[in-house]
Amino acid sequence: MADLQEGLVISHLGQGIAVEHDGKIILCQTLRRLDTVAVGDKVLWTLAAPDQGRIEEILPRRSVLARPSKNDKLRPVAVNLDRIFIVFAVEPHCDFLLLDQYLTICENNNIDAALVLNKTDLYQSEAIETELKTYTDLGYVLYRVSAKENSGLDNLKEALKDQVSMLAGQSGVGKSSLTNTIIPDKTLKTNTISATTKHGRHTTTAATLYHLPEGGDLIDSPGVAIFGLAGLSEYQLANGYREFQPYIDQCQFNDCRHLKDKGCAIVAALENGEITSTRYDRFLKLREKMALKN
């Protein structure tokens, strides 16, 4: 076998995979026995032909972000993420249920999460500020930015340094505008990937990893606005609520559903004001959502 070399998966291109090695991009194929290779993977590959390689092994991952695919299987979207920045805004509206869904996924997948409130040039109501305080009290870092007015972006760029990050958020919150600001030469980099791999125009809607000017990597995934709760158990859903975590194992029964079950420590914490009713109500809604899909 030819010498194994380590590379970084930066994009999927048609049937090929773009792997970066020593500043160069090699178009690779994978061995059939391997699991699905994802953007952010560190892999061992061999040279199969000039400028063409074959992925022989996927190196251990520290985190996996997946979404449902065919036959209810989970397909990795991006791996080895350190932090997901969840972008939301007053317009179209602050969807705190979706925000909780993202946070639940992060809490259960060893991925740190931070919040990015975009469009701060628009009016923030007192109700929104109350909700935001709940999250910051739980230890989530909140960045207030305006892509339109170019405010707060230096703090966000600083936070992206020296780690692998992703922006996530519903359509219309300004995620693309933020991404284009953070990666000023995104189009140039995208065209370089296409040219190097001789794949023609870069048309993928899958994730692509970009190196940031200030250091660190950003995985841009325009085709994945929402990742669902597939694969999570009821226990993991509750564990996804940070303020529930100290109480989960204090419930009287191991199979407690945290509804009106006898001896439920979470409901007791809710009644004592240690858990907010708005977050608990959203937990119930996500629980119903999970039940409908299972």
Image: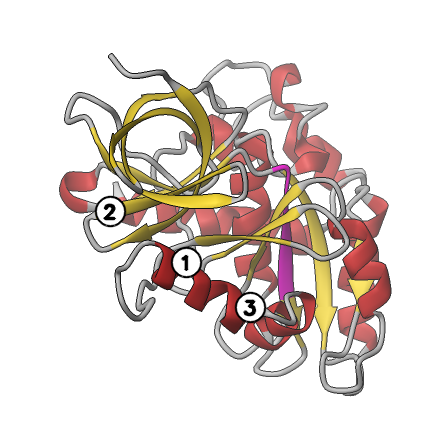
Q: Which amino acid, by three-letter code, is at mark 2?
A: Gly
Q: Which residue is denoted by mark 2 in the rendering? A: 16
- How far apart, in angstroms, are the residues tagged by discs 3 and 2? 21 Å
The residue closer to the viewer here, 193 or 76, is: 193
Q: Mark 3 points at which residue?
A: 186
Structural distance between the alpha carbons of marks 2 and 1: 12 Å
Dot in front, 3 or 1: 1
Mark 3 or mark 1, which has the lower sequence index?
Answer: 3
Q: In which quarter of the image is residue 99?
A: bottom right
Q: For this view, does 75 lie left or right of residue 163?
A: left
Q: Give the range drawn in magenta.
A: 82-87
Q: Is residue 93 left or right of residue 208?
A: right
Q: Disc 3 marks which amino acid?
A: Lys
- The spot of residue 137 in percent (x, y) is 85, 46
Residue 226: give its label. none
Q: Which of marks 2 and 1 is nearer the N terminus?
A: 2
The local secondary structure at tag 2 comes to: strand
